[in-house]
Amino acid sequence: MALVGKKAPQVNAGAVINGEEIVENFSLDQYIGKKHVILFFYPKDFTFVCPTEIHAFQEKLAEFEKRDTVVIGVSTDTEETHLAWLNSPKEQGGIQGVTYPLIADASKVISLNFGVLAGEYSFSTDTKLWSFSGAPVAFRGTFLIDKEGIVRHESINDLPLGRNIDEYLRLLDAQLHVEKYGEVCPANWEEGDAAMKATNEGVAEYFSTN
């Protein structure tokens, strides 16, 4: 079920912040009324595509912060595994230098609640046992959550498909434009482009000038 337009699921888990400190009970509630959130899920620490995305978000972190937005990563690894990876140099496949929070979803509950777990649990009435089919990691899900805690965008990539980080900046710009001006953003809209009023007159005005 799509989460867009709904309150983001509760997040309360251990995390590594500032690239070096493990904290308990990390929650998105701390940003309500204060910050927009880009929450992204990735499959697993110490892998191949994942560090390219994690470093790419770090490289654009100042751009997100200029837009009053925090970036947060999540995988089904533990806090300790996150910390070990954060202490590994980039040239050795590590993510040293990453400063935004990485949440540990070892229970897989957060991934389940956001609909990005790459598998599912099932219970056999014959054996009376639970089993898991698929991959017990998160797909590459990305969620734009506004300051009120409402999901405004979600996208989910399959495990081999890396993200385009600039697209999330574009979507964030569009969301901020909607919030500020009450206008809607047409196809391929970027900051500085003309937007549209959600009326027949507004649509006619947009097309007459584009």
Image (cartoon, rainbow, N blue to C red):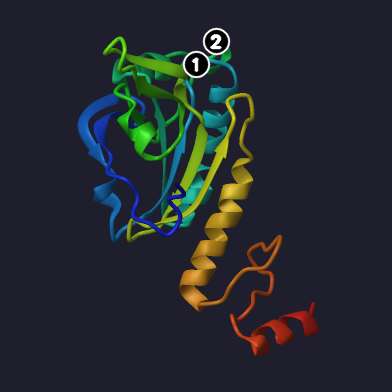
On the image, which quarter does residue 107 sit in?
top left
Give residue 105's position: percent from left, percent from top: 33, 27
Q: Which mark is residue 62?
A: none
Q: Which residue is mark 2?
A: 92
Give residue 57's position: percent from left, percent from top: 53, 37
Instruction: Give whichever of 12, 4 is nearer the camera.
Output: 4
Seen in the picture, residue 165 relative to 129 is either above or below; the reply is below
The amino acid on which the numbered mark 1 sits, given as a three-letter code, is Gly
Question: In the current view of this chain or complex, which residue is farthest to the front?
Answer: 126
Q: Which residue is mark 1?
A: 94
Side of 129 relative to 162 (left or right): left
The amino acid on which the numbered mark 2 sits, given as a three-letter code, is Gln
Badge 1 marks a residue whose secondary structure is loop
* Residue found at x 40% / y 31%: 74
Side of 155 relative to 44 (left or right): right
* Residue found at x 40% / y 40%: 114
Give residue 25's position: percent from left, percent from top: 20, 34
Seen in the picture, residue 139 relative to 172 is either above or below; the reply is above
Image quadrant occupied by the C terminus:
bottom right
* Residue found at x 67% / y 68%: 186
On the image, which quarter does residue 196 sit in?
bottom right
Residues under labels 1 and 2: Cα distance? 6 Å
Seen in the picture, residue 119 relative to 192 is either above or below; the reply is above
Q: Residues at badges 1 and 2 in contact (C-beta under 8 Å)?
A: yes
| Mark 2 nearby-residue class (10 Å; few <14, some 14–19, many ≥20) | few
